[in-house]
Every structure is written in structure tokens, then in C-alpha cells.
Amino acid sequence: MPYIPFTEEQKLRANSVNLVEFLRRQGEKLIPSGRDKRLSSDHSITVRGNEWYDHESKEGGHAISFVQTYYGLTYPEAVKRLLDGEGVAYPQTVPSEPEKPKEFVLPPASPTMRRLYAYLLQQRFIDRDVLDAFTKRGMIYESCEKSRAGTKEYHNAVFVGSDEYGTARHAHKRSLYTQGNSFRRNVEGGDPRCSFHWFGNSGRLYVFEAPIDLLAFLTLYPEAWREHSYVALCGTSEQAMLWMLEKDPRLQRVVLCLDHDAAGIEATGRLTDILREHGHTRVSVLRPEYKDWDEDLKALNGRPAQPAEQHPQLQAAELVCARIAVKCMDLKPDGAMQQVPHLFQCYRKCLKEKKLETAMDCMEEIAALSLLVTLRECRQLGTTLTPAQGSQYLQSHILPHQNRMAIRNRTEEISAQLQTALAKSGAPGVRGEAEKREIASAWLELALSCAKVSVKNDADELKAMEKQKQALGMEMG
């Protein structure tokens, strides 16, 4: 779009837009997360007022940078979208004094746990022996909380997490009502490292998103469950998982049991990376058949269950890499050094003009040529691989949690990778084994980066189509 000279007042107004209201108008579902709101479509992102933070990429900012990052827009496009407000101005966030951290206090307990047992046993099908094990330790109880006016009582299941000395440091509340929207929230002031958990002696740690999933899993697989260790992250942050591993060095194997949806798949990949960074290599993944373990338990008891959700990037990766393998059949590696720079310039031009279909075709052809160069170098090193095997390698290395950056923000990085590959291939002198490996590695890196761009584009289109279907269903519903 043409450059628009915004005034300082307009920039300030755009950057002060309340992101909660902005996202709601975009049709995004938001989940309470303490004082913040978490995106249902991306659990790693939280918003509060005009501020946002991505707990996965460790970056954040205000309204303009959020719209740029999340929707892949340029600065002028982001400012214009925030100012337009689709005809009705978005509300502004009023600056306020920083809030003092609240003291952690457990919600007051109900005299009985009648509602708690009725809800978890009859509505959630949790095994009584499993529930008893936690309630007898005071790790689960029923709260009775008054409304501000003191005229109503609210009863919630409270899942308590304690520190190594047995002192309660964290609590997660979940409503016990079967009608209306479910209420879930962490009690303010809690230490996220000490969320709901159980220490066993087997050296194996099972990791879940929510306490109810943990209980459902134990109900589904009750054999000798007390021997193992478990933690509910009450979200997808790694803090509680790492705290348990730190406090019990016997824990050598981690089993990630997060939700079987796009957010859970991304969180699983991110947590796997974090575990390996901390020296934990014995990591495995166990996914429910349905959306989460609670849904699996519902299905087992004949109740309607929410189906599992595949990540759109994993769906797109299979198709994109198959197209790259087909392109390899019609191309030759010898012309790569001349063709790839031309294709990259074409990509930049088409991206700027928003001709995405042609731009992605260029990316996939660059990926195919780069892959062919890699395979040629591997063959000279004594390893013969087919284009199909090469494309399968690309597919296996496209991980959704590592492929989140907006497409338009990747151009310079890919340009640098291209220059590196050309420089290594064009260097004078006799090439030994080490040089050939460097050439193969540089071109493979370029092939993977280009494939990721096309996968991200296809996945974004899949998500947009799914949102349109949901919106149409709501209109017709």
C-alpha cells in the first residue's frame, strides 16, 4: 500500500487501542488467564489493555506491533486497521498506575464437598479413588465464595499446588456448574512454578495443560498411577515442569500429554525444545484420541466428545513438500546458481504486489532447486538420496512452533541464506569433504526456509477458511 504520513497523535491513538476489544471484533475467542486474556487460537499469546506478550517467542509490545506480528501487516497497514475500527472506533486503553502484586490467599472452603464430588464423578467421570487420593491430601477442595454484594454464593473446584515444604503457593479454580460457560482461573498472587502436581518415585513425569486432564488421564490409566509424577501447567508455561525436575533429580523421563489441538501441538514442540535445552533428552509425546483427556473420558462414557484438531501447518507441510518433490523431477541442480537469484527477485516483487500465489510458486521452486543441489553434494559424498526422501526430510523439520514469523518479515533472512549458499558454491579452489558438507548444509538450510514460507502461507489460508466456515455457521445457526 502507498505510504501514509500518520500524525503523532494518530500513532499514539492506534497504539493505545484496547487489544481485548479489538480481538473480539475480529471474531477471536479469548480465555481468562489471571489478569490477562489468552488467545484460544494461540495459547502462548496473552493480552491486557493495549499490551501483548508471546510467551513462546519471548517478545511483546503494544497494539501496533501486535497487529503487525499477528496479522502480518506493514506498519502503515497496522495503524490504518487500528484507526479504522470498521466504522466504530476501538476503545482506548487508559494508562494506569502499576498494580502491586496481590498476596496469595486460598479461596474459602465450603463446609462440604458434595457439589465437588457430584460434578467430578457424575459429570466428568473421574474415578472416586483417584479423587479421594487428592482430596484427602487437601490438594482438591470445594470453595464457597460470596459475591461482592454478599447476596450470592459461588462454588468452585480448587486445585492446590504446594512448594517443597508443603505450603500452598498456587491454586486453580474451575466452576462446578453444568450450565453456561465454564469458569476457569488461577488465583491471583500464586507462584506458577508450584501449580497442581503429584510426586511419585518412578522417575517418570507426565505433563498436562489442566488439572481436569490430569485426573481424567489417571482415571483412564489407573494401574500403579501413584508411582509416577504428574503436573498440570494450568496453561502451557514451562515453569511448573522445570520446577519439578529441579526438585526431584530422579525424574529422568518426561511424557508430554498436552491437548490434541493446534495450540497443544505448538506447546508440545516448544516444551520439547526447552527440555532439551535443560539437558533432558528422554522426552516422549502422548496425545489423546480426542481434543484432550477429559474428552477421551467423555467418549468412553458415551457422551459427545470434541474431536482432535490437526495443526494446519502439519496439514500444509505434507502438501507443500509433495509439490516440491514433483518440481524436482523437472529441474536440474546445475542451473541453480543462475535461476535461484532470479526467482528470489521475482518472489520479492510478487510479495510486495501481494501476488501470493506466484510468490509461493517461486519459493517452492527455490526450495526444489536448493534441495537438488543438496542431493548432488550428498551423492558426491557417497550418500544417494531421492527427491522424495529429501522432501520428506523437509516435511519432518517444519515444526509449527518454530514457524510463526510473518512471511513478509523473513525476506532479509532468506536473502542472507541465499548469499551464503551462492558464496560457498562459487568459492574458488578444490573442494574437499568438509567444503562439500558446508555447501550441502547451506543449500539445505535455504530449501527448508523457503518451504516454511509456503507452508505458513497455506496454513494461514486454511485457518482463514475455517474462520469463515465458523462465522457462516454462526449466522445460519
Image (cartoon, rainbow, N blue to C red):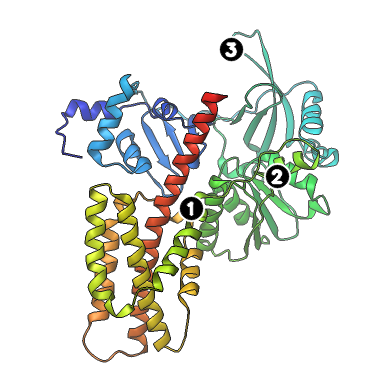
Please state the horizontal and vertical placement of residue 447, each as a whole percent of the image.
Answer: 37, 67
Q: Is residue 292 left or right of residue 9?
A: right
Q: Which quarter of the figure is the N terminus placed in?
A: top left
Location of residue 428 with respect to 183 vertically, above or below:
below
Classify residue 90 as left or right of residue 146. Answer: left
Q: Which residue is mark 3?
A: 148
Q: Which residue is painted at 63% across and 34% down in the image?
A: 171
| Residue that mark 2 sits on | 293
Does label 1 or label 3 sit earlier along the sequence? Answer: 3
In this rendered view, identify the residue nearer to me: 295 or 150.
295
Closer to the observer: label 3 or label 2?
2
Secondary structure of the residue carrying tag 3 is loop
Residue 6, above or below 133: above
The residue to which callout 1 is attached is 313
Q: Earlier in the sequence, mark 3 or mark 2?
A: 3
Q: Residue furthest right?
A: 129
Cα separation, mark 3 vs mark 2, equals 35 Å
